[in-house]
Amino acid sequence: MSTLGLIEYQDASPEVRVIYDDIMTTRKTDWINNFWKAIAHDPVALKRTWEDIKQIMAPGALDPLTKEMIYVAVSVTNQCHYCIASHTASARKKGMTDEMFKELMSVVGMANETNKVVTGYQVEIDEQFKIGR
Amino acid sequence: MSTLGLIEYQDASPEVRVIYDDIMTTRKTDWINNFWKAIAHDPVALKRTWEDIKQIMAPGALDPLTKEMIYVAVSVTNQCHYCIASHTASARKKGMTDEMFKELMSVVGMANETNKVVTGYQVEIDEQFKIGR
Amino acid sequence: MSTLGLIEYQDASPEVRVIYDDIMTTRKTDWINNFWKAIAHDPVALKRTWEDIKQIMAPGALDPLTKEMIYVAVSVTNQCHYCIASHTASARKKGMTDEMFKELMSVVGMANETNKVVTGYQVEIDEQFKIGR
Amino acid sequence: MSTLGLIEYQDASPEVRVIYDDIMTTRKTDWINNFWKAIAHDPVALKRTWEDIKQIMAPGALDPLTKEMIYVAVSVTNQCHYCIASHTASARKKGMTDEMFKELMSVVGMANETNKVVTGYQVEIDEQFKIGR
Amino acid sequence: MSTLGLIEYQDASPEVRVIYDDIMTTRKTDWINNFWKAIAHDPVALKRTWEDIKQIMAPGALDPLTKEMIYVAVSVTNQCHYCIASHTASARKKGMTDEMFKELMSVVGMANETNKVVTGYQVEIDEQFKIGR
Amino acid sequence: MSTLGLIEYQDASPEVRVIYDDIMTTRKTDWINNFWKAIAHDPVALKRTWEDIKQIMAPGALDPLTKEMIYVAVSVTNQCHYCIASHTASARKKGMTDEMFKELMSVVGMANETNKVVTGYQVEIDEQFKIGR
């Protein structure tokens, strides 16, 4: 389910199938998750979003697992249930162990706590942390 | 500056100095940043927060740099200016290069984008991503 | 369902019925959605909230459809599932097409992305954008 | 400063002055803070917002100080610097001591932490907490 | 359900049972809610989180009911469904009446509204509200 | 200022200048705002972000002014000061009058209020609003 419905592979236009195929090839899976099927109603957005993610999540200075855990951290902070479910699954597939997941959650919790406390106390940024010094 | 002011080392009580000393020793620095000087007005909170952070940010299944970048990711998502400044500085000190920082920002941006789009389209969680299956 | 339950029309006090009637008349519908039935437990809040919404959402310098899409944009950013469902339905009723919805989602996604990236890079506001110049 | 500028008392229209006077009388102050001077460019919004706040923040089942601290808690969670500054000042004026402020910050920090951890672990709501049972 | 599953009392290790026992004793209940059963997979986090909450939520300059309502206010602002359900239940148990709940919701709603409006109008903080003057 | 500094036109590489030129041509301006100068340290991100924005903000089913106001609505909800300043300026350039701005702020404020109240009351989505019926 999704606001505009989900477009299954067999019902997809050729331009959408090209993206679906690339997603499955890149991710080494044989299925497409609902997010893509939902935005496939907007093939331009589908193509743009997939190409952005493919570029951004590729190995680089940060490895794919680290990137996936950062994705989870943001999704948890935003309380996005779909994203937490999907990116936790992706992170596990890329090697996130239970121990890593638990530490990830602790860091995310701590960061959310101190983000608010420091703002609540109206703490000024230290000179040492200022950029362009 | 801070709502209750900042407690400098020389003005700190013995119990606060113990924490300040531990912070400097653990972090191998010779100064205390404003966050700690602000919450030092509440020595119980100072002790609790420091001990929590010390435990959570220690090397474990995740290395300290990865943890620090996750902290930055959360702080950016929460738009906490103080935390972005301080944890970006900490991450750099622990080895975050410019390339890593740039990739971190791209992942954070992308995650924030798709977190909202998937929610806006009211996409249901795929069976494959559900827990407890 | 709701924390205090839902007050149906037939069970409503006269003061609540007056608001329910006005909601149905103004919106040209023959039913009341759960939000109002939930806060009807607080007739003062029901009256205040309805009168505020009625005033704010009325045609003005911005047309009702534009206002409704802005409402959706905020609700998506806040990840409020109820509000996304109800205001997407309202926007459609006021003329939002699938094409408009898809563009709305893309703008909301993009804005959420750059909101975070610009903050993460600690970018200073340009002189040209400062108010009161 | 503000996007549309600030409307000072001497420059205000009679309808705006009526609200300014009521704010000062109700709050027992002899000045108007910038928020009101900013939205005074929209006298309808000024009137609506002031009347809402006056009604909501009046003594009731909750006392004014408790309400003000709840306002601070929300403002900290939203990282609204203006609101933190203004409502912390208001809370102090209504009797919030340093001890109360420090406990308030600790609760806000803790709540922000567990809000995210529970969501990150995808914890289902206990039957005992469900409404309408 | 939860990402790592839920650890029931009979399956818990002795160190986890000690915490479970303390939770039930402190809260005068005979059951453990899912949050604790979920993070019990990380006994260090379980112990730390429980001890923090126990310390922070204890009676002090603020009474336990006020603290619980502040917890609800934060949870609502963060749209954390689990936390809203659990802390609303806790607040009721500590004496929150329907009237108090309704006023709490009104204050939370109002604060969220003005937090955004003041930021949207780019209002500068009044000199009178600045700290360290 | 920005974490990595700002890259001015005269110091930019040819690939960055191509983007800068396209931004100025598309927007009919003779200067580049700081956001682009900050992310120009990552030419791939610069190109991707600009092309995405150019595509998304172009006239379509929604006109450019409506899109810009939606951008402001999201930025205000996220409390992103830079984005509020820059997109309010852009919206004005595209024709947003003071009256439109004021109504925009009122809708954003109202949406933020009811987003939280409906969640706080734990209101279930009406059958009529559910998708896929």
Image: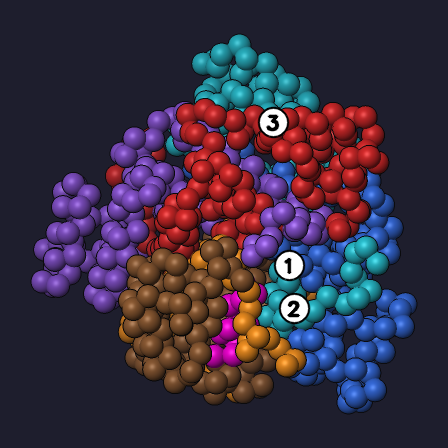
Chain colours: A orange, B brown, C cyan, D red, E purple, F blue
Circle 2 crowding by C-alpha within 10 Å: few under 14, some 14–19, many from 20: many
In the rendered image, the vertical position of residue C69 relative to residue C124, given as above or below? above
Circle 3 crowding by C-alpha within 10 Å: few under 14, some 14–19, many from 20: few
The residue where tag 1 is placed is F80
The residue where tag 3 is placed is D26
Left or right of D116? Residue F30 is right
Q: Determine whether the residue tagged by mark 1 lies in a helix, strand or loop.
A: loop
Q: Are marks 2 and 1 in contact (CB under 8 Å)?
A: yes
**Position in image of residue F113 (x %, y %):** 57, 39
Chain under callout 1: F
**Residue drawn at point x = 51 percent, y = 20 percent:** C43
**Position in image of residue C87 (x %, y %):** 61, 39
Mark 2 or 3, which is nearer the eye?
A: 3
Observer-nearest residue: F49 or B1? Answer: B1
Span highlighted in magenta in the image? B80-90
Observer-nearest residue: D9 or C92? Answer: D9
